[in-house]
Image: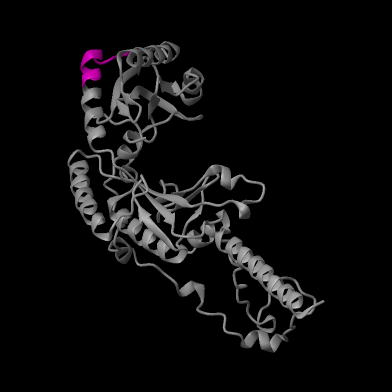
Amino acid sequence: MSTLQVSLAIIGGLVLALIVAYNAWTSRRNAPRRASPEEPEHLADPALRQEPGFDTGAVQLTAAELDSLDRGTDPSVHTVDVLDALQMPVPPMSLERRPGLDPLIDVIAPLQPELIVSGDAALAAMPPTRRAGSKPFAIEGYNEATQQWETPSPGQRYQSFQAGVQLANRMGALNEIEFSEFVMKAQDFADAVNAAPDFPDMLQEVARARELDQFASDHDAQLAFMLRARQAAWSPGYIHQNAARLGFVSGAMPGRLVLPTGNPGLPPLLTLGYDTQAALADDPDQSAIRDVTLSLDVPQVHRGEQPFTRLREVATALCQAMDGVLCDQNGHPLPAMAMDPIATDLELLYDQLDGRELSAGSVLARRLFS
């Protein structure tokens, strides 16, 4: 083999190696980012940790050592002065309306029985469904013992009842057909418990429903922003890992993460969502996700939680950690200054909801905007 042939073979090998290296680098660059292994949680020195239990190797103390142990103050000396107890501060009571039927957003029809009705009889007379069309329907009883309106329960006695149907929700205003269904359900219950119903005027209530629905439509703000990857796509695990650092937890549906509020049982503060098919893939690490949606349901979250401020903080943190850019719903990048007018408009919206006694995050607001 001549020197020329050897040189060409070496050059060809080098070119081939460069092509292979370039392809490997490109594939690695374009592959979705995966979650990095977390550092193991620091554990205390085993010699300093001892789980409680009936260990046969436990230290045995003598009677003299037991007597020398400090047992604390004698319980007999702990007394409570009545006058001091009366002067203790009382926790402030919530001004929020109680859950249940409310004339502000419900049609309410009184149902007066001839005799006291047991909770078991009331439950037996309840309609099989709790909706009239697309509107929630409910029956409450006035508890003879507690003197409070409540959902009928076994073992209780009720002096009177009231049936109600919601005037509006995100499905629209209560219409004549739904009102008629409400009347039929309430009448059937009244007949079962031998009660006399008093239904309001249908046309008046339907008109009130339309007015409330118009107000709700004008003040229903559901904000959604897109976080888009600048270069490499993200895997579901990578998204979960970065979102978890900010307090997000897995939601009820695949591809959905939620940031809980401080009060358990309330709607989430924020929602982070991505492609459901990617979350359900056989190998999620191979799923390439290029954008996620960060959303806020304004009427569902208390104003005091500062949800929009939190949204901006979360969006900034995720964009920095995941090399993303904040965009609108159409994928157009949003400058930071574009968020300030939204914050101003939200403060005005909160004031208008407060003025209508439908404050964001309240029981009535969560029912109306659902």
Q: Is 202 contained in the magenta span?
A: yes
Left or right: 193 as drawn, with respect to 253: left
Q: Is residue 327 visible?
A: yes
Of residues 196 and 34, the one nearer the viewer is 34
Q: Nearer the viewer, residue 299 or 2?
A: 2
**Where residue 329 sits: x, y (%)?**
36, 45
Q: Nearer the viewer, residue 347 or 198?
A: 347
- At horizontal 66% and vertical 79% (from top left) the residue drawn is 49
Name the colouring of the figure.
Answer: one colour
Image-based side of 256 in relation to 24, left or right: left
At x 22%, y 29%, the residue is: 214
Residue 362: x and y in percent read 31, 43
Q: From where the camera sits, is residue 35 visible? A: no
| Quadrant (top left/top right/bottom left/bottom right) for the N terminus | bottom right
Locate the C terminus by quadrant.
top left
Count of numbered tags: 0
As drawn, the residue found furthest toward the right would be 1
Residue 122 locus on image (x, y percent) = 46, 21
What segment is highlighted magenta in the picture? 197-207
Residue 277: image location, x then y, percent: 57, 42
The structure residue drawn at horizontal position 34% and vertical position 39%, both measured from the top left corner, is 366
Question: Where on the picture, by quarter, is residue 349?
Answer: top left
